[in-house]
Amino acid sequence: MKRLLFTSLILLGCSLHYQAAGESVTLTASADTTLHQTVPDNNLGSQFDFAAGATGKIEKTRALIKFDLVGKLPQDATVTKVALTLKVTKQPSSGGASSTFELRRVLKPWGEGTKSGLVGEEATSGEATWKARMHPSDKWSQPGGEIGTDFSTTVSASIAVGDRGSYTFASTADLIADIQQWSSHPELNFGWVLMSQAETTAETARRFGAREDPVNAPSLAVEFTAGSPLQSLRITNFAVEGKSISLVWADGQPPFQVQHRVASNDGLWVAFGEIVQDRFATLPAEGDVAFYRVAQVALAPETAEYEVTFQGTWSAASHPQSFPSGAHWSPLIGGTHNGKVEFWKEGAPATQGIEDVAELGSIVALRSEVNTAISAGNAFNVLTRSGSIGPTGSSTITFTIRREMPLVTLVTMIAPSPDWFTGVHGLPLLENGQWVAGKEVILDLYDSGTDSGLNYNSLDADTQPRERIRKITDFPALVNGQLAPFAKMSFKRK
């Protein structure tokens, strides 16, 4: 007979919601500087202003701004509102062109520097320039910095800027998420880059007061709550009905997550079912003995930034049998999505997109399938990286993922081959309501079931009727009686 034991302990080690009067703090920038395309080796870290936008000759300028949050917010703070105010102190004599300016998180460290002047001075070691985040050795991915590598793909906030005066970037969910992350993880705080969205339009450049100008310095207003945890919730009723369990609880602050484990005082509590707003849940019973609890959880930020690196481990040494000439991996292709769509899985027939990847290394059809899911509201974005990859080479994609679509699918063909591929499908980056810091997946090889070839260089032999996707457990995966992995994917939150 199944034994079901229950507990209503609050989840330990997780951020709880708090009830307390709102508090606020206003900060002045701790570092700011200009990246100037006209003088790519100069630093402007001690200038009384910084510039962003395009000059009259359409030379680009971008600004870096950072606020030190260490010790400024309580450890238990929940950020509720953020507002960044910048003051335009100079504009082109003609009045210039108005444009929208945006903020993006900077993903790598940079050095403010000590140089001044309208175009600065030649940088010394560790100072930021148009070419380098820390002169001379630590370069930006491309001069001026690259979105997706040096700067986030997510715009945290934006505002239209014209004449002289104060401009406040109003609070957004992404601004709040930035400050919340930097408060909890100061090692990730590299500030924002300020850019005009019209960098190809002459005279969109503006000069803003820097921290060296006390009257016009950037200011950051942060509102937050802090205090004692809300009353612990209580499980008030449970029932076993066939192969289902029903739980009802009282008190606590939503959202909630039911969790379970097989031992009462040992093992990892694992999320069970979906996060819910109501104070009840009906779920399938698990195992012969199970212990349950209900946890209050703080929802993860709406979006998160990740870097995925595909690393091939396929070589003549690791897979010596008939190792082919011209060995490579095809371009990566996939997307982020929710659980309502599956692009492939073991035991299912291959879609046209997966067939084309596995047989031809073509990404066109699968990209179309992801775009169809995006149109249907079941996917967020396409993930791809052009260019083939060497058998032991690597390829990296930086991407944004949403809380409502926290799954990743990403594949590549092993080439040459009849219809073999590898990758991940429906991999969750949101666990227990929180974004994971990182995840590594050792990749097996799969047969798409669309071609009957047996060797790397087999001639085309269309499989009729079509078979289902299966993991390859014989040649070429079986080496000395064991399955030898071909590659791995590493996901890292930025």
Image (cartoon, helix red, strand yellow):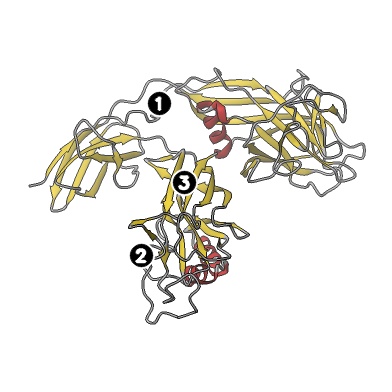
Local SS, label 2? loop
Three-letter residue code for mark 2: Asp
Residue 179 left/right relative to 139: left
Q: Where does the C terminus fall, quadrant-wise?
A: top right
Residue 102 left/right relative to 227: right
Local SS, label 3? loop
Please tell me which residue lies in front, 234 or 410.
410
For the residue carrying disc 1, how many other residues have a C-alpha within 10 Å: few (<14), some (14-19), or many (20+)? some
Residue 457 left/right relative to 469: right
Mark 1 or 3, nearer chain start: 1
Q: Percent from the top left, x then y, of residue 198?
A: 77, 47
Q: Are marks 1 and 3 in contact (CB under 8 Å)?
A: no
Q: Percent from the top left, x then y, of residue 366?
A: 52, 66
Residue beneath label 1, please? 18
Residue beneath label 3, please? 403
Q: Is residue 35 above or below residue 312?
A: above
Residue at the spot 45% in from the left edge and 49% down from the top edge: 406
3D distance between C-alphas at marks 1 and 3: 22 Å
Mark 1 or 2, nearer chain start: 1
For the residue carrying disc 2, how many other residues have a C-alpha within 10 Å: few (<14), some (14-19), or many (20+)? few
3D distance between C-alphas at marks 3 and 2: 39 Å
Residue at the spot 62% in from the left edge and 59% down from the top edge: 386
Three-letter residue code for mark 1: Tyr
Residue beneath label 2, please? 474
Residue at the spot 49% in from the left edge and 52% down from the top edge: 313
